[in-house]
Amino acid sequence: YQAKRQGGGYALYRTGASEPLTAMTLESGLHRALERQEFRLEYQPQLDTRTGELVGAEALLRWQHPELGLILPGEFIPLAEVTGLIVPIGAWVLRQACLQAAAWVKQVPHLRMAVNLSARQFQQPDLISTVTRAMKAAGLEPHHLELELTESMLVQVQDAETTLERLKELGVRVVVDDFGTGYSNLAYLKQYPIDALKIDATFTAKVGGELALAMRDEVLVKAVMNLAHALDLAVTVEGVERPEQLEFLRRNNCDYVQGYLLGPPQEAGQLMKMFPELAAQ
Ligand code: C2E
Ligand code: CA
Ligand code: CA
Ligand code: CA
């Protein structure tokens, strides 16, 4: 099978076939994927920029389809969103990530687990109890859980502020994901109870590179980091792939880094090999 770009998204083709698999094919599979245990999580490490110490991991969803093989979230999350299946799938992700986090926190006490929330999940009236139950079932304390929400969700969703306040009362951390790709209205930064910004890879692709190409991006990234720190928000930069980027981020007081350079998303066992401090001694 092959994924090819089509319109704004992707379509899956059987190798050699000219007709893409329909959304129906994926949707019927998606309905059964949970009960058939076809989902799994990979974890990508997040490091302290200055010390290089492991501070956390982001849980990233994978679908191991029995016929299609590995399907990445970009290909099925949009469909899961429109069908509403993202709600039970997202609840599974939360439970699973909390269980893994609870195990790792025993070894690395300050560790945080970041979980992506979709707009649909964020709007569920029972979001707070879903999150609470996942943490309770795992025996995970709330300050170890970090929920990643996108900028557009915060701006578009009705009563986003109230939901955020309830999450804060619960004691979980809230991070704005893909910062800079959504809205230019920054008013929410001051108003909403958020803990950190995650700067999208598109802004940092050129930093630390050839001066003429890098300059505008470097100015922007520095400005965003200063703004965040002035508002008492931590900054994570994602998509760090090159040593020059990391060097630039170090020089400019970026708090946390994540990207292929520091470690790819990988299965829990792999991550524990990469960071032996996660494994029980
Ligand atoms: P995201 O939250 O922005 O996650 C970061 C994406 O960048 C991940 O793609 C990750 O594999 C990829 N990445 C990591 N390091 C690098 C790097 O150095 N360079 C580049 N170019 N990319 C890097 P992935 O795993 O395919 O996930 C794509 C998106 O799917 C995520 O973007 C997130 O929006 C969504 N997603 C993933 N898991 C979940 C989930 O459990 N629930 C929800 N609602 N969405 C999820
Ligand atoms: Ca994310
Ligand atoms: Ca992101
Ligand atoms: Ca993204």
Image (spheres, rainbow, N blue to C red):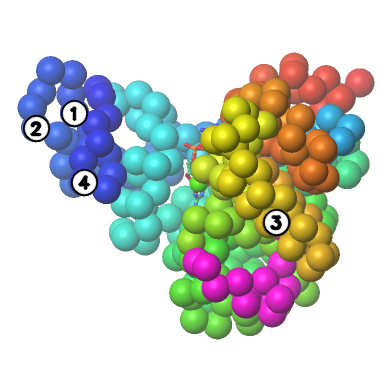
Residue at mark 3 to residue at mark 1: CA–CA distance: 43 Å
Q: Nearer the viewer, residue 221 or 219?
A: 219
Residue at mark 4 to residue at mark 2: CA–CA distance: 15 Å
Residue highlighted by disc 1 = 13
**Mark 1 residue crowding within 10 angstroms, few (<14) / some (14–19) / many (20+):** some
- Residue furthest to the left in view is 18
* Residue sitting at x 71%, y 47%: 236
Residue highlighted by disc 3 = 223
Residue highlighted by disc 4 = 7
Tell me where residue 279 sits by quadrant: top right
Residue highlighted by disc 2 = 19
Residue at mark 3 to residue at mark 2: CA–CA distance: 47 Å
Q: Position of residue 232 (x, y in %)?
A: 82, 64
Q: Position of residue 162 (x, y in %)?
A: 63, 82
- From the viewer's perspective, is the residue at label 3 or at label 1 nearer? 3
Task: Specify start and end residues of the magenta stretch as a single range.
Answer: 183-196
- From the viewer's perspective, is the residue at label 4 or at label 1 nearer? 4
Residue at mark 4 to residue at mark 1: CA–CA distance: 15 Å
Name the amino acid type tagged 1: Tyr
Q: Is residue 273 visible?
A: yes
Chain-order first, disc 3 or disc 2: 2
Tell me where residue 164 sits by quadrant: bottom right
Q: Is residue 45 visible?
A: no
